[in-house]
Image (cartoon, helix red, strand yellow):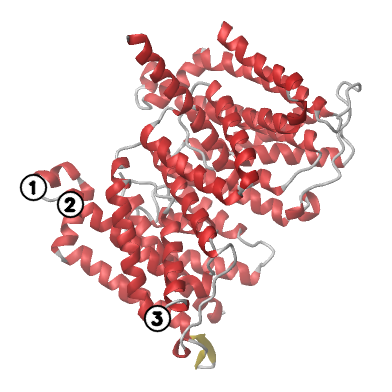
C-alpha cells in the first residue's frame, strides 16, 4: 500500500517535471503545444548520446540535457512558435503535430525504433529499507529533484524581478509592453525554460517511462491531462494534479491491471467535467 | 449543381473504368473522404475542434463488424445500425463537448477517443482486441451484388453512399441550420441575440457528424470484411484532421480533395519508406500552417482571385 503510494508519487513527480513547461505555454501563453513531448524525447536522446557515446556520467548529463533542451526551445520559439501566438488553436494544434511527426521521424531515422537503455550509476540503484518497507533509491532521487525544482521555480516566479515580468506579460501583454517590459524576450526565455525542464524530465524518465521515438506521442496525453486537470499556469495545481494522477495510474495498474490506462482517461474526463478550468485554475 | 461540380463527380466514375487496378485504394479514399466530410461539418462549419473523431468511425466500424460476425451480414441494414449506434454515442457525448472552450473540447474529445480505444482493447472477447475482429462476412447488396476480390462492388457501393450523404450535407450546410452553425463559429456570443439556441444547434451538428462518421466506419468494415483496432486510434483522428485541413475546411469539397491527395501521397511515399512519409507529412503541416492556411482550395481561391484582378 505504502509502496504503491510511493511509486505513484515518484511517477507523479516525473509527470510534474515534464509538464511544467507545457503548463506555461498552454496555460499562460495560451498556446496549444502538442510538440512538448518531442522536447522531452529530445532530452532523453541527448542523455543517451552523452552517456553511451561520450561516456559522460549520468548525473553530469542532466545539466547538459537541460541546456540542449532550452537552446532547442529558444531556437524554435524565435523562428517558428512566435509567429503563431495569435493564431487559432487549430493552427497551433496542426503546427505542433507537424513538428512532432518530424521529430519522431528524425529520431527513428537516427536511433531506430527500439527502446534505448541507460545504465544508472550504482549510487542510484537498489533499494533502501526504512521501517520495514523498501524504497527504490532512484525514485527517492526523482522526488528530491522535483522538490528542489519546485521550490526553485516557486521562488523564481514569486520573488524575482524576472518572475514579476513573466506574470505581468502573461496577464496583460499590452500593458506590460507599455511599462517597458520586453515581452518578446520574456516569452522566449520562459519558453526556453519550459523546454529545458521537459528535456530534463525526458532524461530522468528513461528509467521509469522508457524511451523510443514513439515517446513524443505516447506520453503527450499524460502531460496534457496533468496540465488541463491542474489548471492554467498554477504551479501548485499542477503539482497536485501530477501527484494525484501519478498515484491513480500506478494504483490502477497495480490493483486492476485489466483496466489498464482506462482508469486514468476516465479520471481525466470526470475531473474535467467537475472542474472545467482545472483544480486550481484561474478563470479567464 | 454547377458544371464544375458535375465534372468533379465524374472523376471517381472515370477512375472506376480507367484505373481498375487501384479500386481497393479508391474505395478507401471514398470512405475516408466521407469520414473527413463528417469532421468538416463540426470543425469547418460549427468550429468545434476535435482530436477524437475516430471514436465515432470506430463505433460504426465495430457495430457493423459485430453484427456481421453474429450473422447479420446484410450491408444496408448494417450501415443503418452503425449510423444509429454512432449517432447515439455522439448525441450522449455532445453535451460534454459543446459546453467548453477550445482547450477543454480538445481534451474531452481526445480523452473519449482514448477511452473507447482502451475499451476495445480490453474487451477483446467481443472486439478481438489488438488482433482485430475477423470473420466478418458481408452479404450481397439487395441480395444481388456480392463483394468481389477486385473491389468493384466495394468501390461502387462506397461511391454511392458517399455521393448520397454528400448531397445531404450540401443541403444541410446551405440550410438555415447550416448558416446558424457558421454564425456560431464566427461569433458565439452574438448568435443567441439573433434567437439561435447555440447549444441545441451544436448538439445537433455533433450528432449528425458522429452518425456520418459511423456510416464511414461501417463502410470500411463491410468492404474490407475486417475491423482493426486502428479504426479507433488517435492516429486516425489526427490523420483525418490533417486531410481536412490540407484540402480546406468549411467547404465540403476540401474534405474530399484533401483526403484524395493525402491518401495517394501516402500510398506512394510510404511505399518508398514509411519514415520519410511521416517526416514530410510533418513538414507539410508546418508549411501549410505558416503559409497556406486555407488548404489546397484556399490557395486555389487566392490564385484565382489574383488572376481575376488582372
Q: Position of residue B35 (x, y in %)?
A: 62, 31
**Figure check: A218 above or below B27:** below
The chain identifier of the residue carrying mark 3 reads A
Whether callout 2 and callout 1 share a subunit is answered yes
Q: Position of residue A208 (x, y in %)?
A: 52, 73
The chain identifier of the residue carrying mark 2 reads A
Asked if one can make out residue A254 in the rendered structure from this viewpoint, the answer is yes
CB atoms of marks 2 and 1 within 8 Å: yes
In the picture of the structure, the residue carrying the numbered disc 2 is A168
Distance from Cα at disc 2 to Cα at disc 3: 40 Å
B80 vs B232, nearest the viewer: B232
**Figure check: B157 above or below A223:** above
Residue at the location (54% across, 81% down)?
Answer: A3
Mark with earlier residue (2, 3): 3
The chain identifier of the residue carrying mark 1 reads A
Horizontal side of residue A274 vs A178, given as left or right: right
Mark with earlier residue (1, 3): 3
In the picture of the structure, the residue carrying the numbered disc 1 is A179
Distance from Cα at disc 1 to Cα at disc 3: 45 Å
- Secondary element at tag 3: loop
Mark with earlier residue (2, 1): 2
Whether callout 1 and callout 3 share a subunit is answered yes
For the C terminus of chain B, the image quarter is top left
- Secondary element at tag 2: helix
Q: Position of residue A198 (x, y in %)?
A: 38, 63
Instruction: Please tell me how crowded label 2 is: few (under 14), some (14-19), or many (20+) other residues with Cα within 10 Å.
Output: some
In the picture of the structure, the residue carrying the numbered disc 3 is A56
Amino acid at each position: 500500500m505504502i509502496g504503491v503510494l510511493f511509486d505513484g508519487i515518484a511517477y507523479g513527480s516525473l509527470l510534474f517535471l515534464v509538464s511544467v513547461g507545457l503548463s506555461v505555454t498552454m496555460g499562460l501563453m495560451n498556446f496549444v503545444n502538442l510538440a512538448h513531448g518531442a522536447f522531452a524525447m529530445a532530452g532523453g536522446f541527448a542523455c543517451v548520446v552523452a552517456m553511451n557515446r561520450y561516456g559522460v556520467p549520468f548525473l553530469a548529463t542532466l545539466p547538459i540535457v537541460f541546456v540542449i533542451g532550452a537552446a532547442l526551445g529558444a531556437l524554435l520559439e524565435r523562428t517558428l512558435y512566435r509567429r503563431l501566438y495569435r493564431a487559432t488553436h487549430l493552427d497551433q494544434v496542426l503546427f505542433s503535430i507537424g513538428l512532432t511527426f518530424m521529430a519522431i521521424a528524425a529520431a527513428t531515422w537516427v536511433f531506430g525504433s527500439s527502446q534505448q537503455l541507460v545504465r544508472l550509476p550504482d549510487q542510484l540503484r537498489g533499494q533502501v529499507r526504512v521501517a520495514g518497507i523498501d524504497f527504490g533509491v532512484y525514485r527517492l532521487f526523482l522526488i528530491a529533484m522535483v522538490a528542489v525544482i519546485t521550490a526553485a521555480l516557486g521562488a523564481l516566479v514569486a520573488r524575482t524581478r524576472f518572475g514579476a515580468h513573466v506574470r505581468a506579460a502573461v496577464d496583460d501583454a499590452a500593458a506590460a509592453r507599455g511599462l517597458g517590459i520586453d515581452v518578446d524576450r520574456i516569452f522566449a526565455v520562459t519558453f526556453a525554460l519550459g523546454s529545458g525542464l521537459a528535456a530534463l524530465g525526458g532524461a530522468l524518465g528513461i528509467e521509469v517511462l522508457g524511451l523510443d521515438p514513439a515517446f513524443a506521442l505516447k506520453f503527450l496525453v499524460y502531460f496534457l491531462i496533468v496540465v488541463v486537470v491542474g489548471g492554467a499556469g498554477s504551479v501548485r495545481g499542477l503539482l497536485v494534479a501530477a501527484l494525484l494522477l501519478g498515484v491513480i495510474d500506478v494504483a490502477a495498474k497495480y490493483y486492476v491491471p485489466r483496466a489498464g490506462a482506462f482508469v486514468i482517461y476516465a479520471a481525466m474526463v470526470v475531473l474535467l467535467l467537475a472542474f472545467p478550468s482545472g483544480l486550481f485554475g484561474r478563470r479567464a | 449543381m454547377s458544371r464544375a461540380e458535375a465534372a468533379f463527380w465524374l472523376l471517381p466514375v472515370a477512375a472506376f473504368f480507367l484505373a481498375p487496378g487501384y479500386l481497393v485504394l479508391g474505395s478507401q479514399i471514398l470512405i475516408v473522404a466521407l469520414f473527413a466530410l463528417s469532421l468538416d461539418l463540426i470543425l469547418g462549419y460549427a468550429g468545434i475542434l476535435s482530436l477524437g473523431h475516430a471514436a465515432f468511425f470506430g463505433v460504426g466500424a465495430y457495430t457493423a463488424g459485430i453484427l456481421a460476425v453474429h450473422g447479420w451480414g446484410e450491408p444496408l441494414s448494417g450501415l443503418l445500425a452503425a449510423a444509429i449506434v454512432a449517432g447515439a454515442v455522439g448525441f450522449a457525448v455532445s453535451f460534454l463537448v459543446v459546453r467548453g472552450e477550445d482547450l477543454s473540447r480538445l481534451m474531452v474529445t481526445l480523452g473519449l477517443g482514448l477511452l473507447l480505444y482502451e475499451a476495445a482493447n480490453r474487451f477483446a472477447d467481443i472486439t478481438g482486441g489488438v488482433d482485430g475482429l475477423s470473420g466478418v462476412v458481408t452479404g450481397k447488396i439487395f441480395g444481388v451484388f456480392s463483394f468481389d476480390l477486385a473491389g468493384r462492388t466495394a468501390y461502387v457501393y462506397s461511391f454511392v453512399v458517399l455521393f448520397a450523404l454528400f448531397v445531404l450535407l450540401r443541403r444541410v450546410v446551405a440550410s438555415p441550420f447550416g448558416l446558424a452553425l457558421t454564425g456560431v463559429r464566427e461569433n458565439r456570443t452574438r448568435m443567441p441575440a439573433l434567437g439561435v439556441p447555440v447549444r441545441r444547434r451544436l448538439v445537433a451538428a455533433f450528432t449528425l457528424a458522429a452518425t456520418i462518421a459511423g456510416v464511414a466506419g461501417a463502410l470500411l468494415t463491410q468492404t474490407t470484411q475486417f475491423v482493426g483496432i486502428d479504426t479507433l486510434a488517435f492516429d486516425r483522428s489526427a490523420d483525418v484532421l490533417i486531410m481536412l485541413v490540407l484540402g480546406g475546411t468549411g467547404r465540403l469539397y476540401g474534405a474530399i480533395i484533401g483526403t484524395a491527395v493525402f491518401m495517394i501521397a501516402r500510398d506512394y511515399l510510404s511505399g518508398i519508406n514509411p519514415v520519410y512519409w511521416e517526416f514530410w507529412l510533418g513538414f507539410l503541416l508546418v508549411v501549410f500552417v505558416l503559409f497556406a492556411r486555407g488548404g489546397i482550395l484556399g490557395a486555389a481561391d487566392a490564385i484565382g482571385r489574383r488572376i481575376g484582378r488582372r
